[in-house]
Image: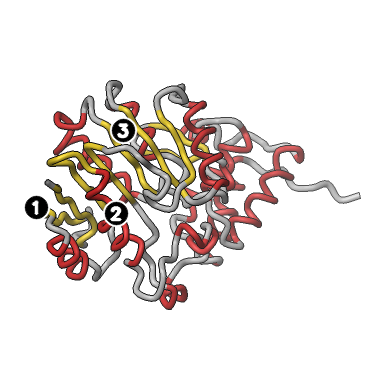
Amino acid sequence: MTKKPVLTVLDVLQSTAAYFKKRRIDSPRLNAEHLLAHVLGRKRLDLYLEFERELTESELVPLRDLVKRRGEGEPLQHLLGTVEFSGHVFLCDSRAMVPRPETEQLVELLIADYGLRIADSKIADIGTGSGVIALTLANEFPEAKISGTDISEDALALARENAERLGLSDRVHFVKSNLLQNVDEVFDLIVANLPYIAAQDRHTLSREVLRDPEVALFAGGQGDELVQELIGQAPAHLRPGGMLALEIGLGQSEGLLSRLAEKNYRDICLKNDYSGKTRFLFARYG
């Protein structure tokens, strides 16, 4: 009987990274490290101290399954079950969109540029998904009263699990609503990362992004329909001088600026993301 070759941590990292590279997975070595660390219950950087450790079959079996699924395009965050966002770890699965670095930057801008004004404010996160925006702001501003809305019951369930995990269930209220339809309150800040991809642009998306719920990605023929609708709804829910903060799609700023002007918003401001693309839109009303 032929004895199976012994595989070390380094062997497995190298072979897995090579497989991912063939499967056109971005950052193949990093993905391999995350998955192996997850299976072994280690921190990723701890693997560098254990390169010569021999892996058992009971460790390799679950790893092989995860590697196969990642190679087929399942997002790394779904396989790990968590995602890091603004220094906090959130549960992450197919019930809601995987949070993107651009959304993290939107939160950073709110904290850095507008923090003093929203510290004890009422805040609404529209299209909350897994709740990362609402919960990060709640953690940053303990005096703020925060609500999160979403049209998806699955996403809201995930958001509530994240709130419980972070000890914020009593501070953030999640409600099912199509934008602001089921909301009666008025707010100092309404923030939203709504679906902003046009249906005809589906072919431009990666395999990983297409694993996100469609309701979290697509918003009609132009892509900005939901953002346009929120701009129309928000004035009735903003206190005088209240702010609307939006993450938007590429090429949408001109039409959205016109919509804001038409609805009598003021102090309208565009900001770029870290890649230099126009991504964020801020405006005040009243």
SS label for mark 1: strand
The 10 Å Cα crowd at callout 2, few under 14, some 14 to 19, many 20 or more, is: some
Q: Farthest left residue?
A: 267
Is there a contact, CB below 8 Å, between mark 3 and mark 1? no
Q: Residues within 10 Å of mark 1 (few under 14, many from 20)?
A: some
Residue at left offset 17%, top offset 69%: 254
Please report the residue visible at 35 percent of the width from the left and 69 percent of the height from the top. 223
Q: Quadrant of residue 139?
A: top left
Name the spot of residue 65 as percent of width and height, x first: 69, 51
**Mark 3 or 2, closer to the camera:** 2
Q: Nearer the viewer, mark 2 or mark 1?
A: 2
Amino acid bearing label 2: Gln
The residue at the point 64 percent across, 49 percent down is 66
Q: From the viewer's perspective, tell me whether residue 156 is left or right of residue 284.
A: right
Q: CA distance from mark 3 to mark 2?
A: 22 Å
Label at residue 266? 1
Q: Is residue 2 above or below residue 137?
A: below
Name the element at disc 2: helix
Q: Is residue 47 positioned above or below 119 on the image? A: below
Query: Could you tell which of marks 3 and 2 lies nearer the N-terminus?
Result: 3
Look at label 3 and name its amino acid.
Leu
**180 horizontally vs 175: left or right:** left
Q: Position of residue 105 (x, y in %)?
A: 26, 46
Of marks 2 and 1, which one's residue comes earlier in the chain? 2
Which of the numbered marks, if any, corresponds to residue 137?
Answer: 3
Quick one: 94 or 69, which is closer to the camera? 94
Q: How many marks?
A: 3
* Residue beneath disc 2: 233
Whether pointer 2 and pointer 1 mark residues with C-beta atoms closer than 8 Å, the reply is: no
